[in-house]
Amino acid sequence: MIIQLLNGLQLAMLLFLLSVGLSVVFGLMRFVNLAHGTLFMLGAFVGLSTVEATGSFWLALAAGTLAAAVAGGLLYLGLLRRLQPAGPLKQVLVTFGLIFIGLEVARLVWGDYAERLPGPASLAGATEIFGVYYPTYRLFVIALGLAVAALLHFGLERTRLGAVIRAGVDDRTMTAALGIDIDRVFFAVFVVGCALAGLAGVVAGPVLSVYAGMDMGVLILALVVVVIGGPGSLKGAFAGALLVGMAETFGQVWLPEVAGMLLYGLMAAVLVLRPQGLLPAGPRA
Amino acid sequence: MTPPASHSRHAVALLLAVLAVGYWLASGYYGKELVAETAITAILAMSLSLLVGQAGLVSLGHAAYFGIGAYALAGFGQKLGWPPALAMAAAVAVGALLALVVGWVAVRLAGVFFIMITLAVGEMIHAWFLKDRSFGGVGGMSGVPRLDLSGIGVDLADPAQFALFALAVALLVYLLLDRLVLSPFGQTLRAIHQNEERARALGCPVGRYKLAAFVVAGAVAALAGTLAAQRSAFVSPELMTWTLSGEILIVVIVGGSGSLLGVSAAAALWIGLRHQLSTMTDHWMLAMGVIFVVLVLVAGDGIDGALRGLWRRIAARRAARRAA
Amino acid sequence: MTAPALAAEGLQKSFGALEATRSVTLAVPAGGRHAIIGPNGAGKTTLFNLLSGALMPDAGRVLLGGTDVTRDGPDGRARRGLARSFQRNSLFPEMTVAAALMTASAIADGGAAAFWRRFDRDPARADAAAAIAARVGLADQLGALSGNLAYGAQRQLEIGLALATRPSVLLLDEPTAGMSPEETRAMLALLAGLPRTITILVIEHDMDVVFDLAERVTVLDYGAVLLEGTPADIRTSDVVRRRYLGERTQ
């Protein structure tokens, strides 16, 4: 039971890293980057290659994060920004096309076989917690997720940039009218979101296996997180990730036959009862 | 956008059918397979065209209804041993039912959210059949029965005859959907697409109309799925992947989203192109992704719109010459 | 004894700390011509949205011909005979005038029987649409795309769409907004010519329009009813003069 809880928490933290970028970008720019899972996969593959070349997991962590950030930045400057006037629908469809490209490029560069990214030696083995032995690396994943959540929370609530982002989510034209260069804020947020997806990819490497096509499954979960949590909000992404992570983990254990439906049921219930999501961003009363 | 007069549309439909039959006559075994595949793809694309082109609902999970139709036929026809005709009808009903359950939630959402939900649910259904053992999991299941048309002298086990049968079904679906598009129902969908708030203020229960469109599209996609399962006598989760949903959306965009004949022509073009690409490389999906991105970047009215634009230009030039 | 065609009872609506509508009560008898005026920010638009169903009130009721429709959305109220025009033109830009008017009447008919009839081959509906186009002064523009019409013509189509649903109550949101003096005069003639089978409630900025058209006027101020009376009452009221007319003539 405790093990399952920890497993759920671990998956939730991975999902949080992945979906927080999607969610805040949606809140700011009203579109969702369907190639976000592809950046996750890119992070994992670049991490894998880095480990194979240098043997250092920590270097891999940095490289995978950086690669996703750079790819995201290029994607934004090269495609998405130009499509801004055409509206969110075109932006979303373009990123859907990029999934195909990303998948085939990954197959061309890294081949068709699944591989496991070795975790850092320092985090090998298990640690006793709440009376059970649990893999140390997975505890690290949980801690990392919590740390990033805390950092983002601090950044959003306490810094000037954070205030601008919150204002942008609430009222974009108003923020632009205040003389803030909203486009640069969009760019920064988008790139940070992509970097976090890459980070999640590397971190997930030792837990899930790395293969071309690993992006779709996590993308779907991340989309569900965004829909359930309410787009645009950090707390929503966190709550949604917890809910989806737990539902997915316990569903697979207790009701493996209907685990997929459980997720749909959860999403349907939230959307019917609270169409705006659990903890949506928006004007604070 | 007002569709051209019925007789000219039906003439084009007939022309497309004649072209397909001509190709069928001239080609060998593989060409006949392509005709069957084109007909099935055209049906699937026409069903999505109703959603995208008329109602403005961009679904990225349409393959799920195609796949569920195929699996339902396998389930009823093979596992339960129902007569194939009954199993086929039941499979179409299952497609409609699934669309009803998914649509009930999805049509409450607009734009980007609708895309996210349809993609997510489509992949959930796909994932379910990947894991599910009773239908063979990843490997799928063979031995799906075919419709018995020996009463009218047609043997559907013969791929050549099956291709013609699929073509006939596609023509029937065209006539049916064409009628629907021209009905007050279709007109109301276009009204919702153009201005949802106004349609609601005029008394339109917008959600119910969108749901109805979603269910019709799901049922027709399931019908296409039953044909696909009969063609190969085989079902697998491949039938419901997101890549197929993407392919169909490309076909619909290329064909000019709202035009049933445009998307049918685009289906033929796409099947031909994919066949060429896949014989050349294992990585044909890369080309597909590039086509997809470029299409979205430049997409105007698709094939149908381009032809009509050409026609307008010719007509304008003629008028100018006459005036001169 | 007949119930008023449209009635509001103690309507209340707040946005956060802002009380946009404060216990507004009004009743328009069948065939009546009623206007709502008030300075900017008086809560006219909020009240309009509460009446049309675009907003749900925090408290109070909306009645159509004596039936409580408070819980119905905009479409449900429209099916009960309430039609509205929009302050900013809200049309079907890619439809011709004829198609848009036919669409509005088809939507009003609703029903599943509509599945198998042909929309484009319905002479009765086309005739009805042409009659409405003539009524709103668009008889010679039936074939023009709604989105390509001149602004004034779009305002006329705005009214035409509402009329095409054969309403019993018509809510008009600043029908002459943005119009030139001539266009305003034409619009006034159009509205004055509407049959008494239609009850009209109009929100207006233009005092001439209000005094010309309405039999009863409600003055809103800070979300509450300041005064209700005949146009003559309003014209001579000191309170209104100070709060509203005075402001405008300064």
Image: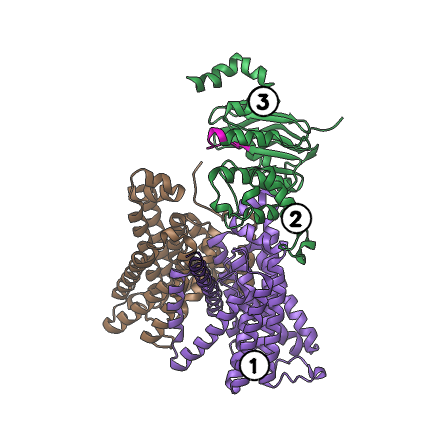
Chain colours: A brown, B purple, C green
Q: Is residue A208 visible?
A: no
Q: Which mark is residue B232?
A: 1
Which segment did they paint magenta? C173-182
Q: Chain of mark 2?
A: C
Q: Is disc 1 on the same chain as disc 3? A: no
Q: Residues within 10 Å of mark 3 (few under 14, many from 20)?
A: many
Disc 3 versus disc 1: distance between alpha carbons?
74 Å
C181 and B303: which is toward the camera: C181
The chain letter for the residue carrying disc 3 is C
Q: Which residue is mark 2?
A: C125
Going by the numbered disc 3, the residue's amino acid type is Val
Kindly identify the residue that appears in the image at 64 percent across and 66 percent down.
B94
A270 or B153: nearer the eye?
B153
Q: Residue at x 56, y 57 (%)?
A: A265
Q: Is residue B246 above or below residue C6?
A: below
> Quarter-wise, where is residue A195 in the image?
bottom left
Q: Chain of mark 1?
A: B
Q: Position of residue B145 (x, y in %)?
A: 64, 81
Secondary structure category for the residue under label 1: helix
